[in-house]
């Protein structure tokens, strides 16, 4: 069977994995390095925060994170006065994606 023939189906995943295996491996890794109170979902939050800090627009963050509703995403960008002052001094327009906390 040619590679990628079933792309887009469960059998043809680009990164084939079993969600239980990923969760188990994550928990084992946390135990191995003595990390307590870290959950796999925390990584999604951290990744989302880093995207906003890098200046990625909410539309793009939504695509990357798989969040269809922007309500949850709107809690991430924390506007900072320094970012507003810097933007105003530059004379550039005020796009919301450039104002996320650093």
Image (spheres, helix red, strand yellow):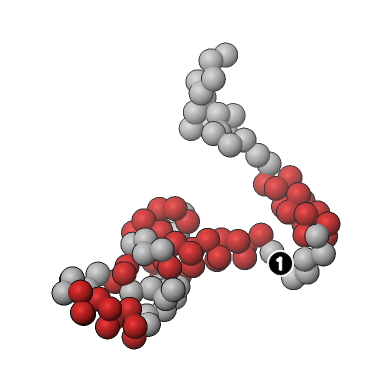
Instruction: Quadrant for residue 86, please give it.
Output: bottom left
The crowding category of the residue bearing disc 1, from other C-alpha atoms within 10 Å (few below 14, some 14 to 19, many at least 20), is few
| Residue behind mark 1 | 38
| Number of numbered discs on residues | 1
Q: Report whether residue 64 is seen.
A: yes
Residue placed most toward the observer, 26 or 54: 54
Disc 1 is placed on an element classified as: loop
Residue placed most toward the observer, 38 or 11: 38
Q: Residue at x 49, y 67 (%)?
A: 49
Q: Position of residue 70 (x, y in %)?
A: 39, 66
Position of 33 with respect to 53 (left or right) is right
Q: Position of residue 36 (x, y in %)?
A: 78, 69
Q: Residue at x 37, y 82 (%)?
A: 80
Q: Residue furthest bottom?
A: 81
Q: Residue at x 48, y 32 (%)?
A: 8
Residue 28 drawn above or below residue 82: above
Instruction: Quadrant for residue 56, please give it.
Output: bottom left
Position of 53 with respect to 35 (left or right) is left
Residue placed most toward the observer, 66 or 26: 26
Residue 17 drawn above or below residue 85: above
Image quarter of the N terminus: top right
Residue placed most toward the observer, 49 or 75: 49
Position of 18 with respect to 75 (left or right) is right
Q: Position of residue 61 (x, y in %)?
A: 41, 59
Q: Residue at x 71, y 67 (%)?
A: 38
Q: Report whether residue 20 is seen.
A: no
Image quarter of the C terminus: bottom left
Q: Residue furthest top?
A: 1
């Amino acid at each position: 069977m040619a590679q990628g023939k079933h792309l887009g189906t469960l059998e043809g995943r680009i990164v084939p994995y079993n969600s239980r295996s990923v969760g188990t491996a994550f928990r084992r890794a946390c135990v191995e390095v003595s990390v307590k109170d870290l959950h796999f979902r925390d990584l999604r939050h951290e990744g989302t925060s880093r995207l906003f800090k890098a200046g990625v627009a909410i539309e793009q963050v939504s695509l990357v994170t798989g969040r269809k509703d922007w309500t949850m995403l709107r809690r991430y960008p924390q506007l900072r006065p320094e970012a507003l002052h810097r933007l105003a001094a530059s004379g550039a327009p005020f796009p919301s994606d450039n104002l996320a906390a650093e």
